[in-house]
Image (cartoon, rainbow, N blue to C red):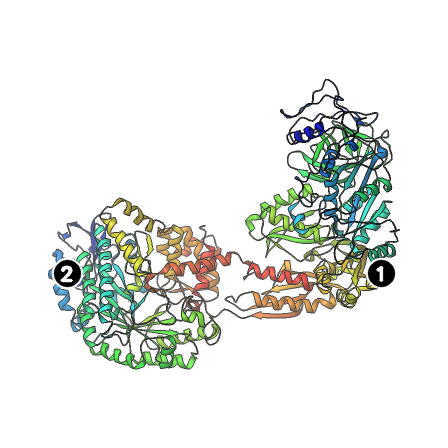
Amino acid sequence: MDILARIQAASITAPCLAPQHHHKHLQQLCFPMSTGHHFSCFYMHQNHFPVAMPGHPCRIPSGSIRCQSGAVEAPEMQDVKFSKSMLSFDMGKDRLSKVPASQIRNFSIIAHIDHGKSTLADKLLQVTGTVSDREMKEQFLDNMDLERERGITIKLQAARMRYVAKDGEPYCLNLIDTPGHVDFSYEVSRSLAACEGALLVVDASQGVEAQTLANVYLALENNLEIIPVLNKIDLPGADPERVRNEIEEIVGLDCSEAIFCSAKEEGIGIQEILESIVAKVPPPKDTSMNPLRALIFDSYYDPYRGVIVYFRVVDGSIKIHDKIQFMASGKEYEVDELGVLSPGQMQVNELFAGEVGYLAASIRSVADARVGDTITSSANKAGMALSGYQEAVPMVFCGLFPVDADQFGELREALEKLQLNDAALKYEPESSSAMGFGFRCGFLGLLHMEIVQERLEREYGLNLITTAPSVVYRVQCADNTVVECSNPCELPEPGKRVWIEEPFVNIEMITPKEYIGTLMELAQERRGEFKEMKYITESRASVIYILPLAEMVGDFFDQLKSRSKGYASMEYSLSGYRKSDLVRLDILINGEPMDPLAAIVHKDKAFAVGRALTQKLKELIPRQMFKIPIQAAIGTRVIASESISAMRKDVLAKCYGGDISRKKKLLKKQAEGKKRMKSVGRVEVPQDAFMAVLRLEKEVV
Amino acid sequence: MRTCFIEISYQVRTNTVSLKYADKRHPCWPFQTGCPTSGFLNLQKRRIVAFSCSCQRPGGEAEKHKQPLRLRTDDVFPGNNELHAQRLERSNANVHNSFVSAIGPNGGRDEQTVAGLHNDDVHAGNGLPTSAYVHLPFCKRRCFYCDFAIVAIGQRNDANSTNIDSTMGSYVTTLCKEITSTLSQLPQASPLKTLFFGGGTPSLLPPQYLSRIVDTLDQHCGFQCDAEISMEMDPGTFDKQTLKQFLGLGVNRVSLGVQSFNEDFLKACGRSHGLQDVYEALDIITGLNVSNWSLDLISSLPHQTLEHWEECLREAIGLSPAHVSVYDLQIEEGTKFGVWYKPGHHPLPDEDKSASFYRLASSLLREAGYEHYEISNYAKPGFQCRHNMVYWKNQPYYGFGLGATSYFNGKRFSRPRKLKGYADFVELCINQSSDNFSANEEYLSFYSNTVESVEDRVCDTIMLSLRLASGLNLNELSKNFGHELRVHICKSFLPFINSGHAVAVDSKFKTVPPDTFSTALSEQSASKVLKDVIFIRLTDPDGFLLSNEIISSLFTDLPIK
């Protein structure tokens, strides 16, 4: 009792100092201190149990307790009455200690946005003492501001926890967090591939959503053991029985042992979840004697240490200072730093098959250590890389232009920096007469695009104009070549092309039945082709359409949400290319084509789009000194036309009593306004007119 | 000896005056450049020792000037009592008029103005002002469109007369203090060429108060003998006796605020006078033989139609004023109109309609023999407002009184617009002149942020000169700001010259065809050809109507950040 109390007191100054609970085991004294302290944790490889080596005094902040290895016998747990928080505190402190592969459980959490994944993850960290109550920030795993704000996970991370199960054995649980959006389905699939099991978290009042399904299928593809968890059971609207049936019906998963839980506040069912992970998720195979193969499931760029790679050791082991090779990129590096995530980075010297950790090796760009790549040892190379590696293929493109032309350099630097951290982001310089210099960027999907734009504006202080997003078209040319094209301006001349193909997606919408009609209407408007509809329960249905991706990159998702009052959810996957009757629609101002407004649209829609855009421009472009025709044209054929009549009067009459300063102020303001305009030929188009038309284009195209 | 034929300008730097003949009969008139008549004289304590014209040009009455010409200081510096008395005597309207005609009613100078070849314009910009604006803020009531610095005093009656007099009296006292403190700080104030009493309604001020102001100015800087002294007057605020007294004080130009010849519009504007007052005021003015009078009109009033406007213009032309100002109604924030109306929306005329008002005024007034010499001003030959020309030509001027702006020593300064603030400001000025250190600091901070930058000066030059029919003088521009700017500005003008909104004029006052101009610009020899282009002016009415658009485009193009 005394000892425990003293240790707890000491933990204030030496949070890493803790005794082993099981008196039979040796004491482990030292854990990594706060960043910058020398790391000294030693263990015996043979039994994976930690031990402090004699002769290596541990560095502990002065004033804290110094225990000699094995000198203190911790009392039996059962003998001591201690609070829950003390229990978790003690448990968490040993989370770096090694356990045999058979006591490792790697799992992730699958959930729809808002179904409580992050809250549950937080609770697990708290209960296992990985994060103290004091350290607990809400949604610990989502550490980008943007993620926190949107309540979604963009970049995944991992957390190693120690849990002493009811069988009395300590288990090492690795939670691998997954991004929650379909744009990142490849990243999701890689983190699932790093696990043996997954918690399927479903909101007990909402039921299964489209996104949940997509990720469940990914998990099943990766042969994961799935543990159904019904969350938020204490909410007034919760109907766990109905949702349990729903899961059984839709996913075909046995839910008889589904866990009822509420991750908020008290944490109902958390212990059951932990026990269930230990019992059901299979342990990793102990293949630590094989040549090293480790799967990268995430990486990010740190300006001081280079790329930090998150990985799961599949075979063999990895030691600090090892020479390693990334099998897809072929790049070789020496491991400078090795550690585990718990959830902060904590250094260790070696990691074995089944363990999850991170490394730093002065890697210059995430492109060298891409998600899905396999790490192997340079000295003892594995014969084959792990399967499933894919190059990132951008699906959605748009032009990004700085509002202020002087920011072009800054934009380039910002994109370079973002790319260090985001191998999926592609960009190349683009220039247009109206917009000046900018970049054409490729993204995994719409969310990815929005996130990049927002980060550029928020983190780099850039003010950007974005063109309407477009997809990659395949153009069959008359000379029998196929040209891929995402920029409407680069579309080959009509005479040179035989046909155009565009990417289509399979889209599944899950909706309460009252919105089926309106969502089908939406899909029809967007050139959707009806595939299938089935009722998943009495009140909810799944509707499947094949839809051109181009129709989805606009405001489809927003429309789906608003037309279903927020109840419907959707999921899509690329289904391939198909021929479509597409044309390039040009917008001409005073006879000059306005490149950024050019769009590839379906022939049937060209007229409506053309009319909407010309009308909007007429509204927004101020009168100038001459008449300005505004036209929408397909090739040389004008399909919609408006005109702005010439300015008649812009004169300040009075300049009273020689007070010219006011007049000058007005004229200078007017001149400032002109500087912010983009000139298209002789016509000056205000920046916000541009933005408004681009916004409109996103809606109507 | 006819002192009125000589113009004097004072050069602070060299402490000399230069004299120029303003006499048409002199062979050197009107181009004094290089003529030794404008040779410098030594000036010692305000005394001209001698003046001789060694001009050898033949012809005319040149012979007369071959002999050294001696002038007394008092002849050219009307600062002493003797001349003051003389001036007062002359203020009789008849004498005044004959005086004007004797020098060919400012004719010589005005022609030069159109040509823009006033050599002293530039010198004057660096020198001390010879113009002053005096603000007299009192009005019976505030008109619905007005956002000037005014003080509404209501209709004068027996009950409030004393109050009004004391308010005006204390304002005039403060005003005179400001004049005294400003002018007494200067090493040598030049006599005024122009003085403008603006308001407010200056004609509400009792003549004895105006006399105090004139006396104060006379005492500290004096007037040139042909000085233009303008006064704004509103119908219904003066009688024959009052105007006679104003004229006696030296006022020789009257600007009558008629605004409209339609009773309904006058009411709708919140004017304090009716149509009857207008005609009575006109009777008084013509009855006293004031020939140099101006008439103010406002166009684009609510509910105004082209027919109304034409009627109004024809009525004005019928009265044959020497000068007409036509202001397009501007809706200002904080005015009643600003609350009631939105520019371009009913009942205000839309852009097209108010443009047609402007065109109509321009064509009718020009037909009637008025020169459209400035965007909103028209004058019969020789009757341009010399005071306002000082503003357009970016020359320095004093500003005295509530909310008045001044421009000298390269600084523009606006005085406080509230009576209390203005009184405090004047206190500071006085303390400053008495070398009170702390107040001095404060005073300086008043001025410190108003020094005009080169960019400001370029902008001022462009925006002011383009208001004039004569346009922008490129020779002056390159002299003051360098040749590169000249070429740059010519390039900026090209689209407007091509579109017919501006024209280039050569040294022979001939229009340079747009083709020639644009070819010149695109060729290597640009500088040579451009040398011949002396002026660029806006066309009337197309260029004038879009002057803001054109000026702001020129600003946008300026190479200066």
Left or right position of A660 against A390 = left
From this view, report whether residue A364 is shown above or below residue B236. Answer: above
Left or right position of B423 against A223 = left
Give how far across and how far down residue B341 sits, in percent.
Answer: 45, 72
Residue toward you, B81 or B361 = B81
Report whether residue A572 is seen: no
Residue toward you, B377 or A125 = A125
Badges 2 and 1: C-beta atoms under 8 Å apart? no
Give how far across and how far down residue A138 sits, in percent.
Answer: 67, 45
Give how far across and how far down residue A694 sits, in percent.
Answer: 63, 60
Residue depicted at x 53% and y 65%: A622
Query: Are there few (<14), some (14-19), or many (20+) residues within 10 Å of tag 2?
Result: some
- Mark 2–mark 1 Cα distance, whole angstroms, equals 117 Å
Q: Chain of mark 1?
A: A
Secondary element under disc 2, as helix, strand or loop, is helix
Give the mark toward the camera: 2 or 1.
1
Q: Chain of mark 2?
A: B
Q: Which residue is mark 2?
A: B63
Residue A536 numbered mark, or none: 1
Q: Quadrant of residue B335?
A: bottom left
Residue depicted at x 69% and y 45%: A139
Which image quadrant: the N terminus of chain A?
Answer: top right
From this view, report whether residue B172 is shown above or below residue B439. Answer: below
Secondary element under disc 1, as helix, strand or loop, is loop
Report whether residue B66 is seen: yes
Residue toward you, A433 or A72 = A72
Q: How many marks?
A: 2
Left or right position of A285 against A683 = right
Which image quadrant: the C terminus of chain A?
Answer: bottom right
- Name the kind of residue labelled 2 in the image: Glu
Residue toward you, B276 or B335 = B335
- Name the kind of residue labelled 1 in the image: Ile
